[in-house]
């Protein structure tokens, strides 16, 4: 029986400890493993399907509007699914399920933090985003402010957030491909990067949207099926699941209450702020509001997205607790068969192991393929957001003063995509050993400190001036980045120092209030003629934000 198990494991291509995400690598040579043909066959079917969508989308993409926003022709329901697909990334399925598996209730709290930000977007931002913007969130901020200066800041802010979020997806995808194919981690990351480039360069937003919609449906279906199959082993009783999880986990009863992860109130508050407000500063999420025809559809898309995301988060938490019992007590899923040691494939692969345990090779292949499609779709959306910041904000508007042809802008977009792809690959390799859900938390903290304060003040505060927006935004960005680099997550884990200079993992509690403070103080002190004109222009902006008059095309500013 043991031999049979070993053969099955080998067939999965489950690699040893160089893959391990949550702990140090183990030394020793590794033999090449035979491949799981069911899983790989399923995987290639998915990849081929998404490439066909890209080919179709490339034939539909005729203008910059098609490329950036799918020509504004996506319905609220379709966009809701696409947003859900964008948001239910590698961090959700792989990272959050692994976090619940490892930390119990702490992981559940983390999940709630990811969800709470959606009402803010629903009630405060969705309608105004659609009415004021065209391609990027910089369109909104620069509506009444200095176009060039604001777009330079917005491009820096967007690119920083995009690069941080790309790390998350590349790590998740690299681990997944390594687990499935038995490839070295750097090779796996390069493959992901190459496929992403194909999606974005040829298909643009149309391809990205439809891949996101399809994979959102498949992810919801696959995750729900996995949860049902796992819960069938507990007679569909959450009480039985909780009892057995407590028995199986090393921490016992402690997994049902706040633990070490939330022990520090300052760290917890900082993390919560980042998760709640960070979502409203993610460029690839904000871009999705420009793909719908009007503000009504923008509101509908958030409504649908919130429902799908909320449901999936509950599914993921169920998977985490079920895995404690099913995976946590089975030696075949651990390196050298040591229960409680290092998981084969790394700490982020809990959901994949669970799929293998309850559904066999075929279901494992299906979920691997869906997870990979998920990552590719999110990475494509991110690359598109980053590339549009470079081509639309910096090149077309700042450098060319709005005189760039569509052909020139598209060429710069594709060059920027290639550059971002290379950066993503390098960063993905560097951050191999980090939990992907945790990395998302850091990214959200940076977004909450950089883009969100400027965006919300531009929409709602008459007194905002260009100087206030620029200095406040850069203050938040620099402060967040410095604190992240000096935190235990980077200073100790990635850079290898003995002790962190900044004791907290999340920056938002310090960097976000700083951004708002600088915005308000500098704007109040700015008495220039330009600043007075910007304050006066708020009335026109308010009318357009409420009515959508003139929103069909880009404003002339």
Image (tube, helix red, strand yellow):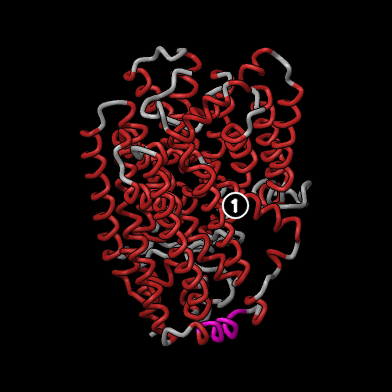
Crowd rating for badge 1 (residues with CA inside 10 Å; few <14, some 14–19, many 20+): many
Say which element carries label 1: helix
Note whether 245 is above or below 98 in the view shown. Answer: below
Where does residue 221 sit, x and y in percent of width and height? 33, 65
Asked whether 243 falls inside the magenta stretch, the response is yes
Residue 179's place in the image compared with 415, above or below, is below
Q: Quadrant of the N terminus?
A: bottom left
Q: Which residues are magenta?
A: 241-249
Q: Residue placed at 43% from the left, 60% from the top?
A: 307
Which residue position is annotated with label 1? 276
The answer to which of 44 and 31 lies nearer the viewer is 44
Q: Nearer the viewer, residue 187 or 235?
A: 235
Majority secondary structure in the magenta region: helix
Across and down, in percent, residue 70 comes to 31, 36
Q: Say left or right for 179 vs 110.
A: left
Give the camera-side residue of 26 and 239. Answer: 239
Q: Is residue 71 left or right of residue 127?
A: left
**How many marks overall?**
1
Q: Residue at x 67, y 28 (%)?
A: 463
Among the 4 quarters of the image, the one containing residue 176: bottom left
């Amino acid at each position: 029986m043991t031999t049979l198990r070993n053969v099955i494991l080998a067939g999965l291509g489950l690699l040893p400890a160089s893959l391990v995400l949550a702990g140090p690598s183990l030394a020793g040579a590794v033999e090449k493993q035979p491949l799981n043909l069911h899983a790989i066959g399923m995987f290639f079917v998915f990849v081929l399907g998404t490439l066909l969508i890209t080919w179709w989308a490339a034939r539909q993409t005729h203008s910059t509007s098609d490329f950036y926003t799918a020509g504004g022709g996506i319905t609220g329901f379709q966009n809701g699914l696409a947003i859900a697909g964008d948001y239910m990334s590698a961090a959700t399925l792989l990272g959050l399920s692994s976090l619940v598996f490892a930390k119990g209730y702490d992981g559940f709290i983390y999940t709630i933090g990811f969800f709470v930000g959606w009402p803010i977007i629903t009630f405060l931002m969705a309608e105004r985003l659609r009415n004021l913007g065209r391609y990027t969130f910089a369109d909104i901020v620069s509506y009444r402010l200095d176009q060039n200066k604001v777009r330079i800041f917005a491009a820096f802010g967007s690119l920083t957030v995009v690069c941080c979020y790309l790390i998350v997806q590349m790590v998740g995808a690299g681990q997944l491909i390594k687990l499935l194919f038995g490839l070295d981690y750097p090779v796996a990351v390069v493959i992901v990067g190459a496929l992403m480039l194909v999606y974005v360069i040829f298909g643009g937003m149309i391809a990205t949207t439809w891949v996101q919609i399809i994979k959102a449906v498949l992810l919801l279906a696959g995750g729900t099926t996995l949860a049902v199959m796992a819960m069938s082993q507990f007679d569909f009783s959450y009480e039985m699941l909780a009892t057995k999880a407590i028995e199986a986990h090393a921490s016992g009863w402690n997994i049902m209450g706040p633990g070490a992860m939330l022990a520090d109130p300052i760290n917890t508050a900082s993390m919560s702020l980042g998760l709640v407000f960070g979502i409203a500063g993610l460029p690839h999420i904000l871009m999705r509001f420009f793909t719908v025809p009007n503000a009504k559809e923008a509101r509908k898309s958030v409504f649908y997205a919130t429902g799908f995301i909320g449901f999936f988060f509950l599914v993921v938490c169920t998977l985490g607790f079920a895995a404690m019992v099913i995976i946590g007590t089975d030696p075949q899923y651990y390196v050298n068969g040591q229960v409680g040691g290092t998981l084969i494939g790394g700490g982020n692969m809990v959901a994949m192991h669970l799929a293998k345990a309850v559904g066999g090779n075929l279901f494992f292949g299906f979920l691997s393929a869906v997870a990979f499609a998920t990552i590719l779709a999110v990475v494509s959306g991110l690359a598109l957001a980053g590339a549009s910041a470079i081509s639309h904000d910096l090149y077309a508007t700042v450098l060319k003063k709005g005189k760039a042809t569509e052909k020139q802008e598209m060429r710069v977009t594709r060059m920027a995509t290639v550059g971002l792809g290379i950066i993503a690959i390098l960063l993905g390799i560097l951050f191999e050993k980090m939990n992907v859900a945790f990395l998302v938390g850091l990214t959200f903290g940076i977004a909450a400190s950089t883009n969100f304060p400027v965006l919300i003040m531009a929409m709602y505060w008459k007194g905002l001036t260009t100087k206030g927006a620029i200095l406040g935004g850069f203050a938040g960005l620099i402060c967040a980045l410095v604190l992240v680099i000096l935190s235990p997550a980077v200073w100790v884990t990635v850079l290898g120092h003995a002790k962190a200079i900044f004791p907290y993992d999340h920056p938002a509690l310090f960097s976000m209030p700083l951004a708002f403070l600088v915005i308000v103080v500098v704007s109040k002190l700015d008495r220039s003629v330009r600043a007075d004109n910007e304050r006066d222009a708020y009335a026109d902006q308010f009318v357009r934000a409420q009515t959508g008059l003139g929103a069909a095309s880009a404003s002339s500013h």
